[in-house]
Image (spheres, coloured by chain):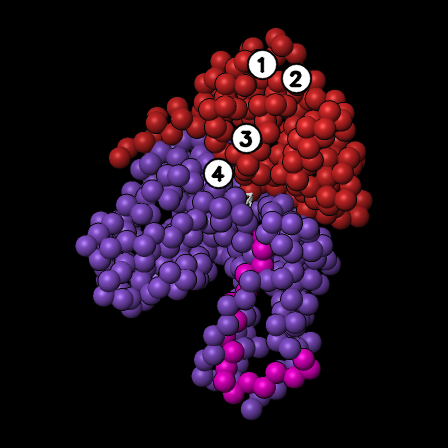
Amino acid sequence: MEKHITLPLTDKDIKELSSGDYVYLTGTVYTARDAAHKRMDEALAKNEPLPIEMKGAVIYYMGPSPAREGRPIGSAGPTTASRMDKYAPKLLDLGMSAMIGKGKRNPAVKEAIVRNGAVYFAAVGGAGALLSKAIVASEVVAYDDLGTEAIRKLEVKDFPVIVVIDSRGNDLYETAIEEYRSE
Amino acid sequence: MREISTEKITETISSLCIRANHYLAPDMKNAFCDAVAKERSELGKKILGQLEDNLKIAEEDMIPICQDTGMAVVFIKVGQEVHITGGSLEDAINEGVRKGYTEGFLRKSVVSDPIERKNTGDNTPAVIHYSIVPGDKLEITVAPKGFGSENMSRVFMLKPADGIEGVKNAVLTAVKDAGPNACPPMVVGVGIGGTFEKCAILAKKALTREAGSHSEIGWVKDLEEELLEKINKTGIGPGGLGGAVTAFAVNVLTYPTHIAGLPVAVNICCHVNRHVSAVL
Ligand code: SF4
């Protein structure tokens, strides 16, 4: 099913999303990848506050290429989500509502998605030029020294994603591949 | 002796880095057209369409095809009649990478130490593979490699008794484990034979061979065709979201090996299989 959603995601939005839905997101998302996750994890270990409000946040696993003059951002497609599996359950327990990435998640992440009523979206990997067109503004909000790995606040408009793991734990990577397997 | 200046080499590498990250070679574009015709999944077709649009936007607006503009892998064939003037060849190559990645608005994705992980800020150093060949030319291939797919690559040290079935299993295992992580449709580079490191370099080099071309060795060509068919039956599909097009091509290179071994390397590349060459 095709849907248009304005962020932040409500509990109702999340409940109504099903694995396989094609969704266009509009609103605020934050970027964070390996190094930013490591730093947030260290902050949590020291009982320090996180640089962004995790409750209701949508985190996009992405590190852009530099923007050319006059543009908000460079190429901006998803990175492999499994590298963030180590950190995701903790952030989900803190209220993160959705993640955007590409590739499989481990059982601990799936459990945390179901436990917290969250969702995992995939954006098309390797479509960074196309996806950059759905990003209208970008601003570094934390960890500037990490360069491409800094945390950015993005304003997206009709950003195309696909629901891979829904709040009931259905996983499109498993079901769709089975459907087309002909070995 | 023919003289080639390091300055010329730096300029060439710089422009190849920029070109590789914005324009896919024609063989990859053809592979996309064929794939759209073969795909059965509606979502798969939609994703392939987006990837084609992505290529157009990249060219027209000069936005890198993918934000992971890779670690710069450079294959350089140095004619033995060439005299390089003006400094070190290695420095000239790295200077070219620095210039290309900085001036071309490409992402800097290299850290100086694998554990301390501080970004070098200019995407250097490159990974350089030299070979000395007859002649008075310098042939340079730049192949920026993204790590979503690089991370899913494998080396298998098989036994001679495992034979060709063992090789097929190795390739299919690597591809299935890679699944959606490697941004399918993939190009699969396979190196068979040599030693531990030789087969890995062969697999990398195989990725620079045109998609759709085949080995001149009979059994290797058959293997390439059979593996492509089998990979496309796994159901992984475009974006790993199910479908009939999981790979565009399987390219295999071979080398003599030891009586006791059968090394196999599988270097997985995503649909953004970048490689451009120039001859000086
Ligand atoms: S695997 Fe390839 S297409 Fe995917 S993010 Fe990395 S470089 Fe881009």
Q: Amino acid at mark 3?
A: Asp
**Residue with the mark numbered 2:** A95
Instruction: Say which chain tag 2 marks.
Output: A
Instruction: Give me the C-alpha separation between circle 3 and circle 1.
Output: 15 Å
Report if the beta carbon of the residue with label 2 is closer than 8 angstroms to ligand 1. no
Q: Which chain is purple?
A: B
Q: Is B235 inside the magenta-drawn segment?
A: no
Where disc 1 sits, the SS reads helix
Which comes sooner in the sequence, label 2 or label 1? 2
Q: Which chain is red?
A: A
For the residue carrying disc 4, how many other residues have a C-alpha within 10 Å: few (<14), some (14-19), or many (20+)?
A: many
In the picture shown, does residue B232 fall above or below B123? Answer: above
**Residue with the mark numbered 4:** B181
Q: Is residue B140 left or right of residue A133?
A: left
**Residue with the mark numbered 1:** A116
Q: Position of residue B146 (x, y in %)?
A: 55, 49
**Residue with the mark numbered 3:** A85
The answer to whether marks 3 and 1 mark residues whose Cβ atoms lie closer than 8 Å is: no
Range drawn in magenta: B69-87
